[in-house]
Amino acid sequence: MMRRTITSAVMAYVLFCMSLGSAHAQVRSRNPRADVKHSDKGLFAQAQKAMTKSNYAEARTLLKTLINSYPNSDYVPRAKLCLGDAWYAEGAFKQAEMEYRDIVAFFPNRPEVAKAQMKIESIQKMAKI
């Protein structure tokens, strides 16, 4: 009697675990693009689309989400550059310059630094005029 109870409990546990695993697999396979949209690559792609449509506030929100969610991502320097570009496009040159200076300070060996420095020089020239 005790053996049958233990066997039944173990079988119930195994079936329960299997059903959890298959339910989890079904949830994941239902919308495989959902993970991509919220990945660093997906957030950057969405921000780029927003930038091309001149939706700069939306782009900044997406880029800040990327930076905060994936601080070690290779997309972070590019996201900072795009943040600067979004501010620059709206004429908010002080905010843009701060973003560009962050790139120079925190990512000195990245190729984005050259563009950031050019933008900083451009802002400084406009300030002198």
Image (cartoon, rainbow, N blue to C red):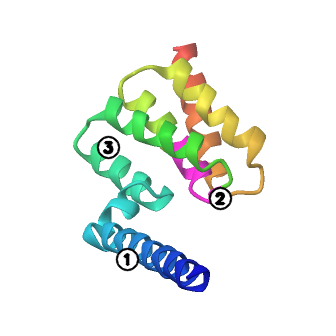
Mark 1 neighbour density, 10 Å: few (under 14) some (14–19) many (20 or more): few
Label 2: which secondary element: loop
- Label ID, residue 42: none
Is-magenta flag for residue 95? no
Q: CA distance from mark 2 to mark 3?
A: 21 Å
Mark nearest the camera among 1 and 3 is 1
Mark nearest the camera among 2 and 3 is 3
Q: Which quadrant does the N terminus fall into?
A: bottom right
Question: Mark 1 highlights which residue?
Answer: 22
Question: Mark 2 highlights which residue?
Answer: 111
Task: Where is residue 80? Give x, y as percent.
Answer: 56, 41
- Look at the picture and state if 39 lies above or below 113: below
Task: Where is residue 10? Give x, y as percent.
Answer: 55, 79
Q: Amino acid at mark 1?
A: Ser
Main SS, magenta region, reads helix
At a point 62% along the width and 60% down the height, the residue shown is 74
Is-magenta flag for residue 78? yes
Question: Mark 3 highlights which residue?
Answer: 51
Mark 2 neighbour density, 10 Å: few (under 14) some (14–19) many (20 or more): few
Q: CA distance from mark 2 to mark 1?
A: 45 Å
- Look at the picture and state if 12 lies above or below 59: below
Chain part drawn in magenta: 73-81
Q: CA distance from mark 1 to mark 3?
A: 40 Å
Contact, mark 1 vs mark 3 (Cβ under 8 Å): no
Q: Amino acid at mark 3?
A: Met
Q: Amino acid at mark 2?
A: Pro
